[in-house]
Image: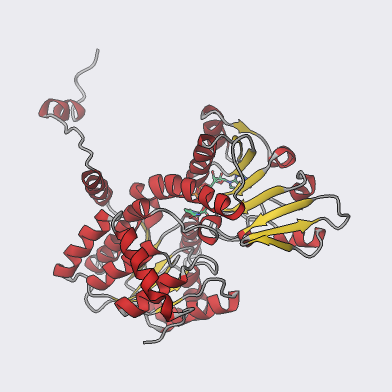
């Protein structure tokens, strides 16, 4: 088996942590148990590009239980948990190519190795594997049953491929399932982003001004949780509707040029480029702490900051101080501008990834079952799948809800009754 990981001897610790996460993933476990019996993925080669975390390990086990030959690579150079990679190789015989802190060259070598495995299904997170296939190995597209995409940014890229007429196979937008982005992006990113900021800095959030750049699903989660910890939260947006939501949720909404002057912490979650740029770094207070939890590391214009600063000094793991050339002030950057929740913490807690990865496992099964009929383009899973995942999750949480009575059902499907 070909693999490229940091140290196979880390496997025992990784196994323990994978099993710990599994306790919080009851929906995925039920799917795994069914997959073991039904083998819906028998003989399917899957290349999965994901953050190599304990939760992803449980997804990989599920795909393997379904009969797939799965290979894993990292979807970000800083998000790999090396003990998890070791355990997947040693304990489950699943090839992994991922090392925390790998260079961009190594990252891309792993992406190409994933394509060399001639996958039938690509599970992507950010669309780097699919984009590389279309740019460098177009001939593989013919054997692809379909791909699945985990995150908002990846879906933006897939839709661009669709518009350009190059997406010649079906892609399931896993992020667009309600049981994914309502929970993973909001509650997952909300908690784990602050976890990353706190683990990296150990600074009290209470009483600090924290600027959330982008009030989408992730931004709402970060803002809500930061307020819960006592921070004064400021939101910046470019979308007037999201901005009104921010205002009515009780946050102060400002343009970034003004927010830049008052923030103690900045968290970007936009999926957009250079949302904190040179002029914003220039107007920040001494000691302002800046990080990103959006998918790619281009949300902060770190080239501009490097250009304005002396050589950065590492203050703690994942904490770098950029001192201005005139020595008047510093800006602190966390996690090299990469997803802070995965760089400095452990990513989302297992309980939300349970639903996200239930969607991934069921998407792989859906692609295989519907391979003759699904056309090229971006698809979402049928809403019954969302309902089923939500019902299973509620049952696992011990929460019961009401059912429609025949009277209610009749009312909801008729138009005659009014005032
Ligand atoms: N850290 C994680 O674990 C994690 C989890 C899920 C998603 N993501 C990533 O986070 C990013 C955001 O995801 P989302 O689901 O919240 O997307 P979203 O589309 O719901 O929200 C993004 C928001 O950013 C706003 N925006 C865009 N440019 C802006 C700018 N210059 N200034 C201010 N606001 C701006 C948009 O108007 C939008 O409201 C994506 O890159 C996504 O892939 C990260």
188 is higher (above) or lower (below) than 154: above
Q: Is residue 10 visible?
A: yes
x, y percent for residue 118: 37, 82
Residue 165 location (% of width, % of height): 47, 66
Can you name the residue that lies furthest to the left here?
406
In percent of width and height, residue 344 lies at 55, 59
Residue toward you, 388 or 170: 388
- Furthest toward the bottom, the residue is 1
The picture places residue 110, in percent across and down from the top left corner, at 49, 79
Q: Nearer the viewer, residue 147 or 86?
A: 86
Q: Answer left or right for 314 relative to 243.
A: right
Image quarter for residue 25?
bottom left
Compared with 285, 64 (above or below) is below
Quarter of the image with the N terminus in it: bottom left
Of residues 413 and 311, the one nearer the viewer is 311
For residue 392, above or below residue 90: above
Q: Quadrant of the C terminus?
A: top left
- Give the number of callouts: 0
> Observer-nearest residue: 394 or 195?
195
In this orientation, does residue 122 appear? no
């Amino acid at each position: 088996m070909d693999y490229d990981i940091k140290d196979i001897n880390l496997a025992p610790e990784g196994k323990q942590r994978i099993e710990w996460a599994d306790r919080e993933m009851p929906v995925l476990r039920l799917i795994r148990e069914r997959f073991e019996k039904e083998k819906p993925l028998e003989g399917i080669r899957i290349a999965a590009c994901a953050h190599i975390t304990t939760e992803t390990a449980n997804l990989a086990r599920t795909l393997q239980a379904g009969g797939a030959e799965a290979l894993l690579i990292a979807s970000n150079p800083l998000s790999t948990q090396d003990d998890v990679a070791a355990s997947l190789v040693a304990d489950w015989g699943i090839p992994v190519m991922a090392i925390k802190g790998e260079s961009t060259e190594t990252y891309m070598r792993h992406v190409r190795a994933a394509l060399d495995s001639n996958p039938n299904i690509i599970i992507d997170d950010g669309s780097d594997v699919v984009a590389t296939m279309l740019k460098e190995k177009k001939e593989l597209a013919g054997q692809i049953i379909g791909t699945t995409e985990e995150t908002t940014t990846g879906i933006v890229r897939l839709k661009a491929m669709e518009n350009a007429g190059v997406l010649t196979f079906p892609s399931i937008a896993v992020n667009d399932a309600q049981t994914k982005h309502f929970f993973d992006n909001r509650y997952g990113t909300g908690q784990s982003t602050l976890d990353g900021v706190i683990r990296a800095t150990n600074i009290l959030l209470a009483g600090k001004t924290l600027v959330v750049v982008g009030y989408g699903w992730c931004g709402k989660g970060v803002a809500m949780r930061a307020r819960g910890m006592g921070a004064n939260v400021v939101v910046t947006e470019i979308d007037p509707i999201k901005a009104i939501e921010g205002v009515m949720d009780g946050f102060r909404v400002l343009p970034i040029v003004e927010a830049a002057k008052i923030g103690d912490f900045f968290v970007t979650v936009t999926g957009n480029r250079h949302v904190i740029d040179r002029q914003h770094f220039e107007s920040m207070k001494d000691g302002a702490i800046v990080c990103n939890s959006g998918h790619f590391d281009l949300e902060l214009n770190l080239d501009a900051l490097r250009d304005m600063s002396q050589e950065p000094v590492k203050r703690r793991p994942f904490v770098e101080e950029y001192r201005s050339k005139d020595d008047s002030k510093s800006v602190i950057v966390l996690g090299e501008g990469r997803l802070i929740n995965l760089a400095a913490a452990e990513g989302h807690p297992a309980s939300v990834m349970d639903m996200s990865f239930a969607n991934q496992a069921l998407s792989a099964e859906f692609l295989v079952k519907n391979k003759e009929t699904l056309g090229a383009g971006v698809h979402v899973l049928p809403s019954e799948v969302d309902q089923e995942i939500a019902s299973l999750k509620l049952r696992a949480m011990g929460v019961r809800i009401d059912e429609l009575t025949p009277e209610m059902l009749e009312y909801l499907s008729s138009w005659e009754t009014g005032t």
